[in-house]
Image (cartoon, helix red, strand yellow):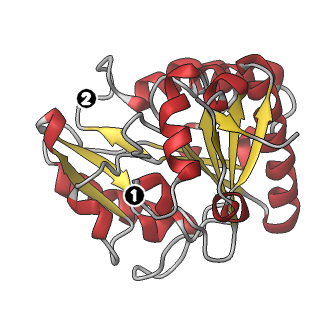
C-alpha cells in the first residue's frame, strides 16, 4: 500500500526521483561535477565527504570514467563520512571500496585523499586524529566545525546514515565532529561524522536506490515526528536533497 508524503517532509527535504539507478547515478555525477566547478571558481577548492557501503560504488565508478578528464581532481579534497574499524585492505573497508572504484582510476593526487588512521587498533584515537586532519586541511581553528561543500550520505534499512545508528551514543553528540560510535548490533565500533559536522555543510545529498529501501523511505517521508537518524540531517545554512530511483519510493504516493 502506498502512503502519502507529509508536507513537512517535503518542505524540509527536496526529493529528486529518477526512473532507474543508471539515470540516478548519471544525474548525481553531473551535480557533483557542476558544484565542484562552482566551488573551485569561488573558493579554489571543492571539499567532498564520501559515503561508504555498496550503493555509491556505481557513482564513484561513473565519476572516474565519464568525468575522468572533466573533474579538476587536483582541486578536490576527499574525506570519509564514516569508516568501519578494519584495516584499509579489508574487504569491509569503505576506503578500500572507494579507492578501487574511483581513486585508483582517476588522477587524484594522494595528498588530496584523507583516509582514517589507526581505525583498526584504536577507534577513539582514530576519530580524534581525523578531526585534526580535517581542521588542518580546511585551515580553520581547532574548535571550529569544518564546512563541507558537498556531503554524500546513504540510508540504511533501519534509518541510519553514515554510521549514526538508532540508539547509538553518537546521536546525541553536540561537540565533536567525528567520533568512534559503538554499534551494538555489530558488536563493534564505527567511525562516523556527527550531526554538527553534517549540518554545517553547504549541500547534503542522500543517495538511495532499490526496492530494498522502499519501506524505510515510506517510514521516513510519512512520519509526523523525527524517528530515524537520517531525519536529523538538517543543514543550518545549506540544503539537503534526496536523490532516489523509482523503486526506492515505490511505496510513496508522490504527486506528478
Quadrant in which the C terminus is drawn: top right
The answer to whether residue 152 is above or below residue 95 is below
Residue 139, percent from left and from top: 55, 72
Q: Which mark is residue 43?
A: none
Residue 63 can be seen, yes or no: no
Identity of the residue furthest to the front in this view: 1
- 240 versus 27 height, above or below: below
Which element is circle 1 on?
Answer: loop
Residue ID at (49%, 32%): 215
Q: Quadrant of residue 6?
A: bottom right
Q: Looking at the figure, which quarter contains the N terminus?
A: top right
Q: Is residue 32 left or right of residue 151?
A: right
Q: Quadrant of residue 71?
A: top right
**Residue 105 visible at all:** yes
Foreground: 240 or 181?
A: 240
Q: Viewer-proximal residue, 124 or 138?
A: 124
Q: Residue at x 66, y 50 (%)?
A: 5
Q: Identify residue for label 2.
A: 87
Q: Is residue 246 left or right of residue 197?
A: right
Q: Image height check: is 93 above or below 82?
A: above
Q: Disc 2 on helix, strand or loop?
A: loop
Q: Position of residue 95 (x, y in %)?
A: 43, 31
Q: Which residue is mark 1?
A: 227
User: Closer to the camera: disc 2 or disc 1?
Assistant: 1
Mark positioned earlier in the residue sequence (2 or 1): 2
Residue 128 location, x and y as percent? 27, 62
Q: Nearer the viewer, residue 48 or 232?
A: 232
Instruction: Tell me what residue is drawn at x 47 percent, y 64 percent.
Output: 225
Neighbours of disc 2 within 10 Å: few (<14), some (14-19), many (20+) = some
Q: Alpha carbon of mark 2 to alpha carbon of mark 1: how far?
A: 33 Å
Q: Are marks 2 and 1 in contact (CB under 8 Å)?
A: no
Amino acid at each position: 500500500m502506498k502512503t502519502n508524503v507529509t508536507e513537512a517532509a517535503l518542505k524540509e527535504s527536496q526529493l529528486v526521483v529518477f526512473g532507474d539507478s543508471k539515470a540516478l547515478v548519471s544525474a548525481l555525477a553531473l551535480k557533483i561535477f557542476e558544484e565542484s566547478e562552482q566551488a573551485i571558481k569561488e573558493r579554489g577548492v571543492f571539499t567532498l565527504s564520501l559515503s561508504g557501503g555498496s550503493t555509491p560504488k556505481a557513482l564513484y565508478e561513473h565519476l572516474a570514467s565519464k568525468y575522468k578528464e572533466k573533474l579538476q581532481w587536483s582541486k578536490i579534497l576527499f574525506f570519509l563520512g564514516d569508516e568501519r574499524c578494519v584495516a584499509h585492505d579489508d574487504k569491509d573497508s569503505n576506503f578500500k571500496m572507494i579507492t578501487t572504484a574511483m581513486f585508483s582510476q582517476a588522477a587524484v593526487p594522494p595528498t588530496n585523499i584523507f583516509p582514517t588512521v589507526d581505525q583498526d587498533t584504536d577507534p577513539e584515537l582514530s576519530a580524534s586524529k581525523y578531526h585534526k586532519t580535517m581542521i588542518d586541511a580546511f585551515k580553520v581553528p581547532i574548535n571550529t566545525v569544518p564546512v563541507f561543500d558537498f556531503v554524500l550520505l546513504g540510508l540504511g534499512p533501519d534509518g541510519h546514515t553514515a554510521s549514526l545508528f538508532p540508539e547509538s551514543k553518537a546521536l546525541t553528540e553536540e561537540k565533536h565532529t567525528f567520533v568512534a560510535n559503538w554499534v551494538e548490533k555489530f558488536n563493534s565500533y564505527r567511525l562516523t561524522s556527527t550531526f554538527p559536522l553534517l549540518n554545517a555543510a553547504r549541500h547534503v545529498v542522500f543517495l538511495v536506490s532499490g526496492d530494498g529501501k522502499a519501506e524505510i523511505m515510506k517510514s521516513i517521508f510519512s512520519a509526523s515526528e523525527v524517528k530515524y537518524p537520517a531525519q536529523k540531517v538538517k543543514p543550518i545554512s545549506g540544503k539537503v536533497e534526496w536523490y532516489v530511483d523509482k523503486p526506492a519510493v515505490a511505496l510513496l504516493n508522490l504527486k506528478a
